[in-house]
Image (spheres, rainbow, N blue to C red):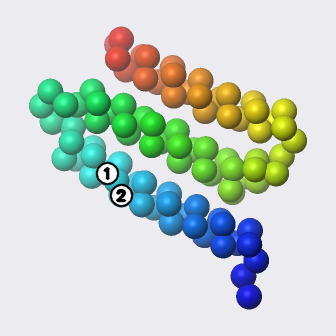
Amino acid sequence: MKTLAQSKASLAWLVLVALTISQWAIGTHGGGGAHHVPASLVIFVVAVFKARLVGLYFMELREAPVQLRGVFEFYCIALLTVLSTMYVLG
C-alpha cells in the first residue's frame, strides 16, 4: 500500500507533466504575433512554479525548517521577478 508521501509525490509528478505539456502548447501555439509577451510571461510563471514543486516535493523542502523553506520561497519569487523584468525591459 502506498504511503501518503508517495501519493503526494506522484500527484506532484503528474502536475509537472501536465504543466510541461501546457508550456509546450503555449510556446508553440501562443507565442506568435503580438501576444508573445504575455505567453512568455505565462511560461516563466509556470516554470518557476514547476521548480517550486520540485523543491517542495522531491527535495523535501516542505518539511524543512522554516528558515530554509523561507529562503527557497524567496528565491522562487526573486527568480520570477528578475526573469520577468529582464524579459519585459530587454
Which image quadrant for residue 2? bottom right
Relative to 83, 31 lies left or right: left
Q: Residues within 10 Å of mark 1 (few under 14, many from 20)?
A: few
Provide residue 81's location: percent of width, then percent of height. 51, 22
Amino acid at the residue labelled 2: Ile
Quick one: label 2, few (<14), some, or many (20+) residues within 10 Å? few
Q: Is residue 19 above or below residue 89?
A: below
Kindly identify which numbered label has been placed on residue 21.
Answer: 2
In the image, residue 11 above or below residue 87: below
Q: Percent from the top left, x then y, of residue 58? A: 69, 57
Q: Is residue 37 above or below residue 7?
A: above
**Kind of element beneath mark 2:** helix
Can you identify the residue that label 1 sits on?
A: 24
The image quadrant that residue 9 belongs to is bottom right
Residue at the farthest right position: 65
Whether pointer 1 and pointer 2 mark residues with C-beta atoms closer than 8 Å, the reply is yes
